[in-house]
Amino acid sequence: MLAYSPELEQSMRKFYQSLSEKDRRRYAAVEAAKLEHGGKVYLANLFGCDPDTITAGEEDIARLPNDPAEGRIRKKGRPEES
């Protein structure tokens, strides 16, 4: 399996964190499609998500351009107070 350089991994994590939940799973799915066997687990570890999240992203992409959630983005929760 192809692995990315540490510098690229850092950039990918920053970009991933800047996305909405829906866009995160879709981005992870696109990246996983570029990699050989084991890519989904590698990216799940890189992004700190469940491999099922990436599978959901693959399903989202397969339904495009029909997106039942188009225009809907979940609002971020309140930060926890200490």
Image (cartoon, rainbow, N blue to C red):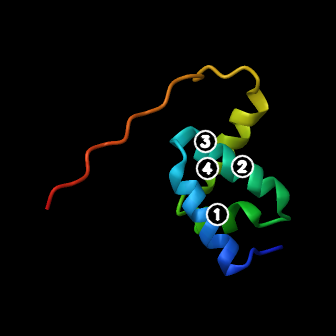
Of badges 4 and 2, nearer the viewer stands: 2
Instruction: Provide the secondary structure element on which disc 1 rests.
Output: helix
What amino acid is at disc 1? Met
Quadrant the C terminus occupies: bottom left
Q: Quadrant of residue 37?
A: bottom right
Compared with residue 60, is residue 7 higher up or lower down, i.e. above or below?
A: below
What amino acid is at disc 3? Asp
Q: Which one is nearer the viewer's eye here, 73 or 68?
A: 73
Q: Which one is nearer the viewer's eye here, 42 or 9?
A: 9
Tell me, yes or no, whether the two marked residues, 4 and 2, touch with CB atoms within 8 Å.
Answer: no
Badge 3 density bin: few <14, some 14–19, many ≥20, Cα 10 Å: some
Q: Quadrant of residue 75?
A: top left
CA gap, disc 3 to disc 1?
13 Å
Of badges 3 and 2, nearer the viewer stands: 3
The numbered mark, 3 or 4, whose residue comes first in the sequence reads 3
What amino acid is at disc 4? Asp
Instruction: Provide the secondary structure element on which disc 2 rests.
Output: helix
State the mark number for residue 29.
2
CA gap, disc 3 to disc 2?
10 Å
Q: Where is residue 46 drawn, in percent x and y?
A: 60, 68
The numbered mark, 4 or 1, whose residue comes first in the sequence reads 1
